[in-house]
Image (cartoon, rainbow, N blue to C red):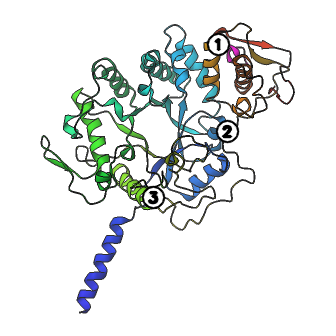
Amino acid sequence: MPLLILLMLLAAGAAGAESATPSLHIGVNYGANADNLPSPTSVATFLATKTTIDRVKLFDANPTFISAFAGTPISLAVSLPNSALPALADKATGLDAARSWIRANLSPYVPATNVTLLLAGNEILLSTDTNLILSLLPAMRRLAQALKAEGLTGVRVTTPHYLGILAPSDGIPSNASFRAGYNTKLFPAMLQFHRDTGSPFMVNPYPYFSYRPETLNYALFRPNSGIYDPATKLNYTSMLDAQMDAIYTAMKKLGYGDVDIAVGEAGWPTQAEPGQIGVGVQEARDFNEGMIRVCSSGKGTPLMPNRTFETYLFSLFDENQKPGPIAERHFGLFNPDFTPVYDLGLLRDGASVAPTPSPNPSPNPSPKPAPSGGGKWCVAKDGANGTDLQNNINYACGFVDCKPIQSGGACFSPNSLQAHASYVMNAYYQANGHTDLACDFKGTGIVTSSDPSYGGCKYVS
């Protein structure tokens, strides 16, 4: 009888060890579309001192966020907005534009901040803009050339892709291939770029967006009968494994199975629409634990065993200002006070709840303006094309705080492209050293010594 009890205790201990996530290093996406988050400096300190998270992916190049990680061991992935790519792809001026962007947005912070990835937009191939799609690879090449020219050789260039880059199939990995057209005209050259530069091919696999009630266990790494691949004689019991091996198969069919794969985003929400099956704290924990085991433990996938993948969990915090379905606001791993939403084993041994948040949280702070521009401002030229002005707004808002021109903001009225573009072009100009180049905007900006501020709308100077 004592022997039986001992065996039962040992079995229970083994089961607990199997379900717990070991303290593995992992990356995280840091979005800040919320009004209740701690300051970037507090976040950086918490991640560096209290967690095993060693990589952070940003969705922009906000200097407040980048500089917050200075002096920490955390590596950073910084993003350019999609709208920036066409200018960088230009054969005549693209390299100069890329060098200008890097000087303004990376050089002041590197190497104090360990920026290791520069992301050329996000899920570009979802776009219906043919010009944007055609700009992607040339822009990536210009950025890589510019980084080398500016001496930032430790920064690699990639771009995150959604899983729709794969042709529709039956979900069996060995049948996977890239979409027609992309498999001949885009990805061979892009994968060669990744091979030449040593950068990873980045994908955003999201079993959450592919599961159905009958495939929930398959998506959550829970026991299930699996999907058999007759070509490889492998049985897949995890949707993430199958998605990763499908990407690998498509790459290998083009001769690029040696190129590293990185996971730019994947996660599972803790809340969703009322009545939605398969969403909650336990489901989110099960998925993320499984993903960490696959990507960070050296377990790998059936076709890529014993490999690790540079991976960024989605997401660090819930983002209560994000539009769309309820789930979009509830992917967070930590609460604003740094307590875990659920335990993933990401806190260091013995770490208690983290530093006290800043008394003045700044969820999406605008960059600190550069020293006074000497009474100079940047505004949109009279008669500038409306499309160009909208493109300027889209571009600048990837780097500066555009809340003042949103409804209810101090600079919303007059509600015109000319006024809104002038405000954000000036904010960008001031944040980038108030140089003539920072006010060029393809010839649509002009520097003025007349303060354009009016009423409650104050232009930075």
The segment highlighted magenta reads: 434-441
Check residue 64 in the rendering and tell me which mark sits there, or answer none: 2
For numbered disc 3, what is the local secondary structure? loop
Of the image marks 1 and 3, the number of the one nearer the N terminus: 3
Classify mark 3: residues with Cα within 10 Å, few (<14), some (14-19) or many (20+): some
Q: At 27% from the left edge and 32% from the top edge, which residue is drawn?
A: 168
Type of the residue with mark 1: Gly
Classify mark 1: residues with Cα within 10 Å, few (<14), some (14-19) or many (20+): few
348, above or below 208, in the image: below
Type of the residue with mark 3: Gly
**Dot 3 corresponds to which residue?**
280
Coordinates of residue 13 in the picture (x, y in percent): 33, 75
**Dot 1 corresponds to which residue?**
386
Q: Are marks 2 and 3 in contact (CB under 8 Å)?
A: no
Classify mark 2: residues with Cα within 10 Å, few (<14), some (14-19) or many (20+): some
Residue nearest the viewer, comparing 296 with 289: 289
For numbered disc 2, what is the local secondary structure? helix
Q: Nearer the viewer, mark 2 or mark 3?
A: 3
Q: Nearer the viewer, mark 2 or mark 1?
A: 1
Type of the residue with mark 2: Thr
